[in-house]
Image (cartoon, rainbow, N blue to C red):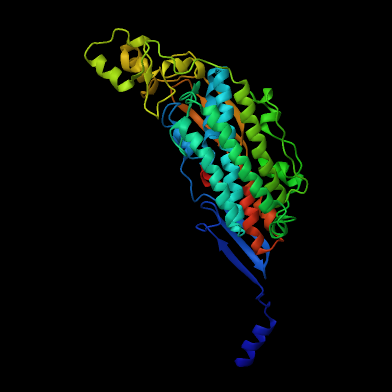
């Protein structure tokens, strides 16, 4: 019996002891969200890789179909929560196309400025986190300092830092606050100083260069085959940027370059993002120079008046002259008063919420406000469908919206830019060392909320 068993062992196929399967995630410090990557290792070399997503699914698209056309705005903040303003504007642009409305010129410039500031925060986070995972913790601290400069600007305008909900169908929530341009130019100058420090710390650093150059190579053929866009595609040398190919807002009036790579590796993707931040800051400065001017904080009665004071006077019937007065709103509502409304919003009551003075001081304004936000009322685009795309921080961010003529979207579909890149990720991992997974995955800049929606 012993000899028969030994014969069976000897004639069976030998089991390889050199290969091992390893799961990275779905909860791991380097996965930038909840995603699982199963790799098969032959020693330290990855010979197979499988990407598993879906751990952060929040039913974004289905939730958008449960309320009126303004309800999805806070949901878009949770797509790419590192650059939420771009997601805000992308969705609003799709609905505005359905309604066949044109936003004001000043609003277009405001959206461009806020989009580019948001793009800078996204690239700062991507480079900083990726560098930290390779041991460059000082770079991470420097870039987070620069990101703080931009976050303070965003908070001044929107009242929030991350979940901003700044856009409105047909405009934006509020105009820029006092001396915002001056503060922005100062923040950009300080951000450039930080980027110069980071450039000297990383770009020619021998350790960083060796870890990034020639690793995670993406060919133009693979990128195009999978539908990859953004810095990942441009690092391959493919010149595709939605702002250039299909210009929207006022990008066709602004002068900026699209940085391109050559080899399509992690190092080129780092350089593309680094250079794109400078181009974004150029766009912001040009937009300030060209943005139409308008009267800011004009008090028709000679004195400012808070919204709460106006409301109290109205309760007692002291309404004479209220409609001609300007109010000083609380910080989260500042810029939404009547003197700003015409500058940043379209004059269409069926689309836009009324200025706060009208909501607080007369029944018509209050009814207009209720009609816009109550279920069964609100926006009613004609039957039809549309797709619009904007250049997100990671590539083409698209929204497909279908209207059935009611106040609720029949269908909302989001085209997230990091989804195609994650589908192609095994191509950039197989054949490289296990240690190369971290910088390659970091260069994807995967955002879980955008990926799983």
Q: In the displayed orientation, state which residue is furthest to the left.
A: 316
Determine whether, in the image, residue 30 is placed left or right of residue 214.
Answer: left
What residue is drawn where x is 76% and y is 48%?
Answer: 219
> x, y (%) of residue 181?
55, 27
Quarter of the image where one finds residue 182? top right
Quadrant where the N terminus sits is bottom right
Residue 52, relative to residue 60: is it above or below?
Answer: below
Q: In the displayed orientation, state which residue is furthest to the top.
A: 320
What residue is drawn where x is 68% and y is 24%?
Answer: 252
Residue 425, relative to residue 83: is it above or below?
Answer: below
Determine whether, in the image, residue 61 is placed left or right of residue 428.
Answer: left
Determine whether, in the image, residue 33 is placed left or right of residue 307.
Answer: right
Tag count: 0
> x, y (%) of residue 270?
68, 48
Q: Is residue 398 visible?
A: no
What residue is drawn where x is 67% and y is 79%?
Answer: 12
Q: Is residue 409 visible?
A: yes
Quarter of the image where one finds residue 10? bottom right
What residue is drawn where x is 70% and y is 46%?
Answer: 271
């Amino acid at each position: 019996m012993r000899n028969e068993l030994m014969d069976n062992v000897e004639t069976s196929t030998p089991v390889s002891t050199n290969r091992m399967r390893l799961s990275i995630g779905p909860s791991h410090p380097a996965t930038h969200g909840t995603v699982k990557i199963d790799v098969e290792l032959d020693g330290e070399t990855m010979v197979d890789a499988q990407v598993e997503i879906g751990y952060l699914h929040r039913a974004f698209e289905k939730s958008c179909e449960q309320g009126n056309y303004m309800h999805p705005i806070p949901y878009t903040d949770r797509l790419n929560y590192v650059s939420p303003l771009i997601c805000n504007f992308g969705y609003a642009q799709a609905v505005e196309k359905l309604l066949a409305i044109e936003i004001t010129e000043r609003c277009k410039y405001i959206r461009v400025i806020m989009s580019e500031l948001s793009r800078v925060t996204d690239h700062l986070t991507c480079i900083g986190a990726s560098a930290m995972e390779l041991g460059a913790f000082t770079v991470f601290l420097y870039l987070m300092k620069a990101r703080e400069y931009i976050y303070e600007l965003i908070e001044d305008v929107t009242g929030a830092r991350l979940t901003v909900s700044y856009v409105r169908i047909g405009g934006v929530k509020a105009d820029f606050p006092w001396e915002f341009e001056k503060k922005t130019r100062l923040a950009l100058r300080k951000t450039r100083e930080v980027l110069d420090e980071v450039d000297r710390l990383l770009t020619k650093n021998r350790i960083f260069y060796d870890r990034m150059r020639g690793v995670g190579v993406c060919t133009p053929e693979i990128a195009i085959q999978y539908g990859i866009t953004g810095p990942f595609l441009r690092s391959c040398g493919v010149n595709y940027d939605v702002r250039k190919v299909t210009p929207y807002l006022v990008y066709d009036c602004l002068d900026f370059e699209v940085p391109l790579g050559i080899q399509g590796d992690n190092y080129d993707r780092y350089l593309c993002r680094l250079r794109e931040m400078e181009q974004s800051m150029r766009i912001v400065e040009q937009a300030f120079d060209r943005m139409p001017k308008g009267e800011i904080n004009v008090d028709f009665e000679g004195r400012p008046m808070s919204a709460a004071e106006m409301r109290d006077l109205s309760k007692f019937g002291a309404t004479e002259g209220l409609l001609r007065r300007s109010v000083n709103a609380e910080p989260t509502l500042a810029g939404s008063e009547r003197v700003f409304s015409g500058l940043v919003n379209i004059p269409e009551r069926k689309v836009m919420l009324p200025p706060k003075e009208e909501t607080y001081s007369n029944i018509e304004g209050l009814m207009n406000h209720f009609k816009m936000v109550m279920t069964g009322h609100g926006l009613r685009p004609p039957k039809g469908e549309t797709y619009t795309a904007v250049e997100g921080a990671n590539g083409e961010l698209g929204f497909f919206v279908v209207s059935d003529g009611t106040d609720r979207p029949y269908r909302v579909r989001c085209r997230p830019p990091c989804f195609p890149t994650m589908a192609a990720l095994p191509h950039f991992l197989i054949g490289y060392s296990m240690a190369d997974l971290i910088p390659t995955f970091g260069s994807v800049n995967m955002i879980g909320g955008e990926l799983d929606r």
